[in-house]
Image (tube, grey):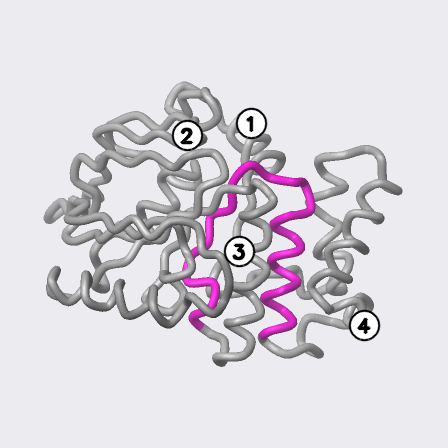
Amino acid sequence: MEAILSVKGLCKTYVTKSNSNTVLDHVDLTVGAGEFVAVMGPSGSGKSTLLYTVSGMDKPTSGDVVFSGKNMSGMGAKALNRMRLTEMGFIFQQMYMMKKLSILDNILLPGFQANNDRAAVRSRADELMKRLGITETARSEITEVSGGQLQRACLCRALINSPKIIFADEPTGALNSKAAGDVMRELVAANRGGTACLMVTHSERVAAQSDRVIYLVDGGIRGELVLGKIGSEDEISAREKQLRGWLGGLGW
C-alpha cells in the first residue's frame, strides 16, 4: 500500500525555563493511502501531540514528516496552511465552529477558501449534509443543534475539499452512544471512499472499526494490532473483544 503519511524519528520536546518535557520520542509511523489507523494509549502518552505534529499544526523538535510525497519540515507557513486546507480534514472532540455563522456557512467556509467555483462547493456541501442526515440544520446556529448533529456538521466541513486524509482527535468523546455510532458510520464510509484517517480515541468500540490500532506509551509506539477493513457493523463486537484482549496484554 502506498504511504500517504510517513513519519521517521519524530520527536517533540517542550522546553520551559525550569525543565524540558519530551512528549514524542523517536516515533516511526506510516499511514497508507486509504488506510484507517487508530491511536490509543493512556492519558498523557502523547496521542494528541502526535496528531497535531504530523498534521503540521505543530512543529516537531526533530524528525521528518512526509505527507503525499512532500517533506513538511521544509515547507513555509503559507504552504502548510494551503496543504491543510486542500488536502487534509480535521475533526476534534471540541467542535470548533464559527459562532456567528450558520451550520451551512461553517461547512462552506473552507470550501470557498479553497475553490473559486462557489456553485460546485455549495453542491458538495448539500450532498454531504444530505448524506449525513443534517440538511434540516443548514440555517441553524451552532447552539441550536444537538452534539451529534454538530459533530456530523464538523465531518461535512472536514470532507468539503475531498481531503486525502482526515485527522480526528477523540471525535466521539463528547457524544452519546447513538451519536458516536452515527459519526463512526460516516467516518468508515469516507474511508471506504478512499480517504485515509488517523484517529486518536480512548474508545475500544470506536478503535475496533479501524484497520490498524497503534498503542502509544510515554511518547513511543509500544504495539500495533492489524484488524483489517471492517466488513459490516455486525463485526464490531468480535473486533472489540479482540482489541480488548490485546490492550489488556499491554497494560491498558
**Looking at the picture, how far across and down is residue 23, in whole percent?**
20, 47
Q: Nearer the viewer, mark 1 or mark 2?
A: 2
Q: Which mark is residue 188?
A: 3
Nearest the viewer among 162 and 65 is 162
Q: Where in the figure is residue 205, as x and y percent of width and height?
A: 38, 69
Q: Which residues are magenta?
A: 148-173
- SS at badge 2: loop
Q: Residue at x 36, y 53 (%)?
A: 38
The CA span between labels 4 and 3 is: 23 Å
The residue under label 1 is: 78
Amino acid beneath label 3: Val
**Callout 1 crowding tier (Cα within 10 Å): few <14, some 14–19, many ≥20:** few
The residue closer to the viewer here, 105 or 238, is 238
Total count of labels: 4
The residue where tag 4 is placed is 136
How packed mark 3 is, by other alpha carbons closer than 10 Å (few <14, some 14-19, many 20 or more), is many
Compute the Cα span from label 4 to label 2: 39 Å
Above or below residue 217? Residue 5 is above
Task: Say the numbered circle drawn on residue 1.
Answer: 2
